[in-house]
Image (cartoon, grey):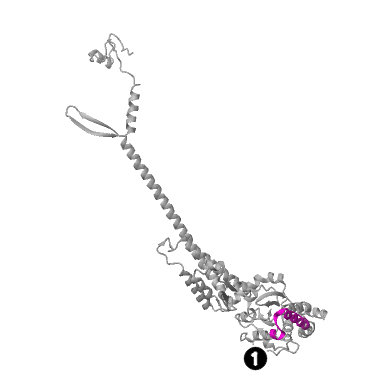
Amino acid sequence: MVSRFLLLALSLCAGGTAWKAQKRHLTEALVASSEGALFSDISRSVKGFLGKGAGTDSDMLREAQAAMASGPSTASPSRASAPPSVSGMPDRARKADVVFEVKQVEDIQALVLETKVPVVLDIYADWCGPCKALAPALEETAINAGGLFRVVKVNSDKFQHISKLLKVKGLPSVFGFVDGEIVDKFEGLPQPPVLQKFLTELVGRKTNAGRVAELRPLSEKFAVEMALSSYPYSKQEKLAAQISEEMDALVPPASEETDGAGEMNLSLKEVERISAMTKVLAAYMRNAAKHRKNPKYTVLNTTSRAFSEKVSPFPAALRVLKLVGFITDPSNRAFLKLTGKNVAPLVIGDRALRRWSDALETRTQFLKRAAQRKAAEERRRQAQEAEDLFAEESDEEEDANVTQKVVCDERTGICALPDRQTSSSVEKEKEEWDESEFERPEPLYTAHGTDSRESEPSDSDSNLEEGGGGAMGATIIF
């Protein structure tokens, strides 16, 4: 059977002329495989899964049927699958109950991400021959499994952004989802054993941890984008505005504006407490969106140290958590439990809080700079005061050392006002007087041998000044 399958697959990929006949034979081969070994493996896998405490066969079937019955309007109005057989395995389901065609992007959220049953997401195109060969096998296997998994088909030509989001490089591309998370995938037309293993592990939820971890970034991004696509834009804007309003109430309006930024009527310590609370709220929402099925992230303990110290003091924070879906657990009021299956409110809340936190950080930096400016101005003022005080003390010291010199006229009997001479002036005069001791003395004797200090100038002296030669010749100076 495998050899026949490979030959047919190769010819289909090459675009052989006998396409219609080969398609029919390939479909029959895959269907025969699904009715035989594949269905037996699925049965054993389901029984093993149920044996681990997941409930009885009937419980699982009823859960799967209830999940299908709550799906969107893309399926037929009558959705109830056939009741389980005596052995516990289901009878054949109707195609309308297990095979769905995506009509609009919003269908992905309900059909793939929120359903309780495993999902095979088939990305195909009408012009793709291998896609047409694979689809009947997937559909027939889902019908034979009686609702234990569903097939959701997406036309890549109509929803190119979904293909781009899932990084589809070839058709067909098939993704396996369990609890809204991608657990495995393959591209192209697989061999029957590969398809058998893929479906058996998917239905039995026997996921490979390494493979799941490898696909997790792709899974998280896909879940977020699809959740936002199913959430009306008007509701997104309203929710973001409500969160911003609650957070703005924590910070009073600016008292004045400087350089386009107002100073907050809060101390720097209070601003830092609000900033820490905002980061904690954003982390709660981000983790809950990534791990929607994990109670560790979807149930918040209000008595924990982090919550008590950083969140509880702010009633606005509790209201924000309620806006995104966290409500008090009726069975234990010490816990907040996340409701709703769509992660869009969590994503919107996380983004709104991070934007608000960035704005708060900008205002906080302004507040810090303003505080630094004030501190610098205060230091300058204190330095100026110290300098002025030192100058005053110096002036008082100089006044104490002033030497007053009184000048009186003996003829008129009038004394002039004293000159204010500081000690520095006195020292300057003293230095001038000391230098005068070293000046050249006046001549004591003239050519006539008389003391110049005692004789009056004569006519002969005047002639000597004018250059006329006297009898005694030039003046001798000792």
Q: Give coordinates of residue 174: x percent, y percent.
A: 70, 77
The quadrant the N terminus occupies is bottom right
Quadrant assignment, res 185: bottom right
Q: Is residue 293 left or right of residue 240?
A: right
Q: Is residue 453 above or below residue 106?
A: above
x and y percentages locating residue 64 in the rendered image: 67, 84
Residue numbers of the magenta segment: 38-60
* Percent coordinates x, y for residue 322 in the rendering: 53, 75
Dominant SS in magenta: helix
Q: Which residue, as the protein is rendered here, is positioned at the far top?
A: 471
Compare residues 389 and 25 and report the one nearer the observer.
Answer: 389
Outermost residue to the left: 412
Q: Which residue is mark 1?
A: 78
Query: Residue at coordinates 33% horizontally, 40% vertically from top-left?
Result: 395
User: Is 463 colored magenta in this rendering?
Assistant: no
Q: Where is 217 relative to 373, above or below?
A: below
* Residue type beneath disc 1: Ser
The residue carrying pointer 1 sits among few (fewer than 14), some (14 to 19) or many (20 or more) residues within 10 Å by Cα, namely: few
Decide which of 310, 219 is in the foreground and name it.
Answer: 310
Is residue 358 visible in the rendered structure shown here? no
Question: What x and y, as percent, mark residue 441?
Answer: 32, 18
Apparent side of residue 255 relative to residue 72 in the rendered image (left or right): left
Residue 49 lies within the magenta run: yes
Mark 1, secondary structure of its residue: loop
Q: Give the residue drawn at x 22%, y 33%.
A: 416
For the C terminus, give its image quadrant.
Answer: top left
Which residue is nearer to you in this view: 45 or 34? 45
* Number of numbered tags placed on the structure image: 1
- Between 236 and 187, which is closer to the camera in this rendering? 236
Residue 348 in sight here: yes
